[in-house]
Image (cartoon, rainbow, N blue to C red):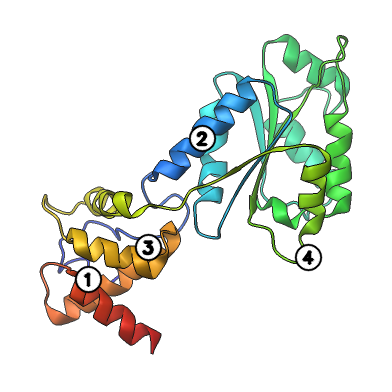
């Protein structure tokens, strides 16, 4: 745990970047991403992809999405595309509550009860040709009226060399793609303040607005990097016995870290 908690009167670490430790959907970009997915699932689009830089919150959104869609969907989440397809089928059938495993008949049964069937794939950039071929088989299953029985939402980082299988497949399948926004300069002060208040800090700003803008410059608006910068700065602030974090302190701290 950070050593500055007592000095700044926190109940818990405000910038803990581990899954589930911070405010849910804490950024405007994540909330917009959730709205985009919900809208297009409801419109019956077959393949959706949410992309973005490392640390922007893709896995956070993938983790909360099943609960947000649960009112009108059966949702299964796959977190490791490299597992064998036999293992993936067991996970899917269990999470989707399918009595006859993963068959057209069981999927038709789910749809007949008014439930959409949605498969969420996290870290989809790891998917190989085999995994994508099995997704093709699921997506090609049809009901008695030739309706598609499965929708897929994939979460993938921005394209990198060696990850072409997924992006070629998305292109061939004419998937809809949404890129998660980073935190803007106008949003960052509110984001930092929300993290601080959630951690139990007494009312009042700890970071000045100008300090938040300098944090944005050093983090490029990526939430994970913002958390890392703020954590380092608070450690240095405690060392200096600084009761408020200003732009000068942030710049000096990050300058020394970079050397």
Q: Is residue 179 left or right of residue 251?
A: right
In the picture, the disc for residue 162 is: 4
Marks 3 and 1 sit apart, C-alpha to C-alpha, by 17 Å
Which residue occupies 44% across, 49% down? 20
Residue 236, labelled with which disc?
none
Across and down, in percent, residue 38 comes to 56, 27
Check the image and name the residue furthest to the bottom.
259
Mark 3 to mark 4 CA distance (whole Å): 28 Å
- Residue at image mark 2: 34
Disc 3 target residue: 226
| Near-viewer residue (6 or 252) | 252
In this view, the mark in front (4 or 1): 4
Q: Nearer the viewer, mark 3 or mark 1?
A: 3
Q: Residues within 10 Å of mark 1 (few under 14, many from 20)?
A: some
Q: Specify few, some or many for label 4: CA neighbours under 10 Å numbering under 14, 14-19, or 20 or more.
A: few
Disc 1 to disc 2: CB gap under 8 Å: no
- Going from N to C along the chain, the mark reached first, 2 or 4, is 2
Q: Secondary structure at mark 2?
A: helix
Disc 1 designates what residue? 4
Q: Looking at the image, how many numbered discs can be counted on the residues? A: 4
- Tell me the distance, in whole angstroms, between the alpha carbons under discs 4 and 1: 41 Å
Circles 4 and 1, Cβ within 8 Å, touching? The answer is no
Q: Residue at x 39, y 84 (%)?
A: 258
């Amino acid at each position: 745990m950070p050593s500055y908690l007592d000095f700044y009167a926190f109940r818990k670490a405000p910038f803990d970047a581990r899954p589930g430790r911070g405010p849910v959907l804490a950024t405007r970009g994540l909330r917009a991403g959730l709205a985009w997915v919900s809208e297009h699932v409801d419109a019956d689009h077959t393949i959706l992809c949410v992309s973005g830089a490392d640390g922007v919150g893709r896995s956070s959104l993938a983790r909360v999405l099943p609960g947000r869609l649960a009112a009108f969907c059966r949702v299964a989440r796959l977190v490791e595309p490299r597992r064998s397809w036999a293992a993936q089928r067991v996970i899917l059938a269990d999470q989707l509550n399918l009595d006859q495993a993963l068959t057209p008949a069981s999927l038709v049964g789910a749809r007949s009860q008014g439930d959409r069937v949605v498969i969420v794939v996290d870290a989809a950039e790891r998917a190989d040709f085999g995994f994508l071929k099995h997704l093709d088989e699921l997506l090609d299953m049809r009901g008695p009226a030739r309706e598609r029985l499965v929708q897929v939402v994939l979460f993938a980082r921005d394209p990198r060399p060696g990850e072409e299988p997924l992006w070629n497949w998305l292109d061939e399948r004419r998937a809809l793609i949404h890129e998660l926004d980073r935190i803007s300069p106008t949003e960052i002060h509110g984001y930092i303040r929300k993290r601080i208040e959630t951690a139990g800090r007494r009312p009042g700003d700890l970071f000045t607005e100008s300090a938040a803008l300098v944090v944005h410059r050093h983090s490029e608006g990526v939430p994970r990097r913002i958390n890392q910068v703020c954590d380092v700065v608070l450690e240095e602030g405690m060392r200096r016995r600084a009761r408020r974090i200003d732009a000068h302190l942030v710049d000096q701290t990050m300058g020394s870290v970079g050397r």
